[in-house]
């Protein structure tokens, strides 16, 4: 299982979304991709992008680091793509 971790916390939309799309295209077989971001506007845009592309998404705020951790997993046939 390939896991990719990318820190996008220095980027803002639309650059963040462009980099996220590029990353997902670069690793089409990745089972899991983790993005780190700093803003909630960027979080919402990334969640919409990931769900539109068929990823299962979970996210959490890492208070100590003041950033969001967004985990994308390949959707299995029985999953619903629920955002937590």
Image (cartoon, rainbow, N blue to C red):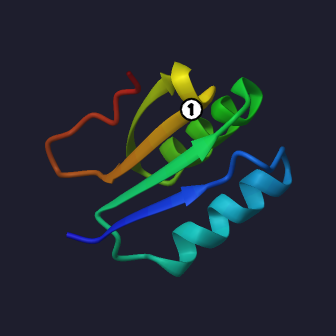
Total residue callouts = 1
Which residue occupies the foreground of this view, 61 or 73? 61
Judged from this view, the residue extending furthest toward the bottom is 26
SS of the residue at dot 1?
Answer: strand
Residue on which disc 1 sits: 68
Q: Position of residue 39 (x, y in %)?
A: 73, 30
Residue at position x 41%, y 26% from top?
Answer: 83
* Location of residue 40 with respect to 7 vertically, above or below: above
Q: Residue at x 48, y 39 (%)?
A: 70
- Compared to residue 28, the image places residue 4 above or below, namely above
The picture places residue 23, in percent across and down from the top left corner, at 58, 69
| Residue at x-position 70% and y-position 25% | 40
Q: Quadrant of the N terminus?
A: bottom left
Q: Residue at 65% of width from left, 71% of height from top? A: 22
Q: Pinpoint residue 38: horizontal percent, then vertical percent.
A: 70, 34
In the rendered image, which quarter contains the C terminus?
A: top left
Left or right position of 3 against 21: left
Res 79 → quadrant: top left
Viewer-closest of 30 and 36: 36
Disc 1 crowd, CA 10 A, few/some/many (<14, 14-19, 20+): many
Q: Is residue 15 left or right of residue 76?
A: right
On screen, residue 26 above or below 33: below
Is 48 drawn above or below residue 8 in the view shown? above
């Amino acid at each position: 299982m390939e896991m990719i971790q990318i820190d996008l916390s220095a980027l803002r939309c639309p650059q963040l979304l462009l980099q996220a799309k590029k990353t997902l295209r670069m690793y089409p077989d990745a089972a899991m991709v983790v993005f780190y971001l700093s803003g909630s506007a960027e979080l919402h845009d990334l969640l919409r992008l990931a769900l539109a592309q068929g990823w299962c998404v979970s996210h959490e705020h890492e208070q100590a680091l003041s950033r969001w951790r967004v985990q994308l997993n390949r959707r299995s046939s029985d999953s619903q793509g629920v955002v937590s």
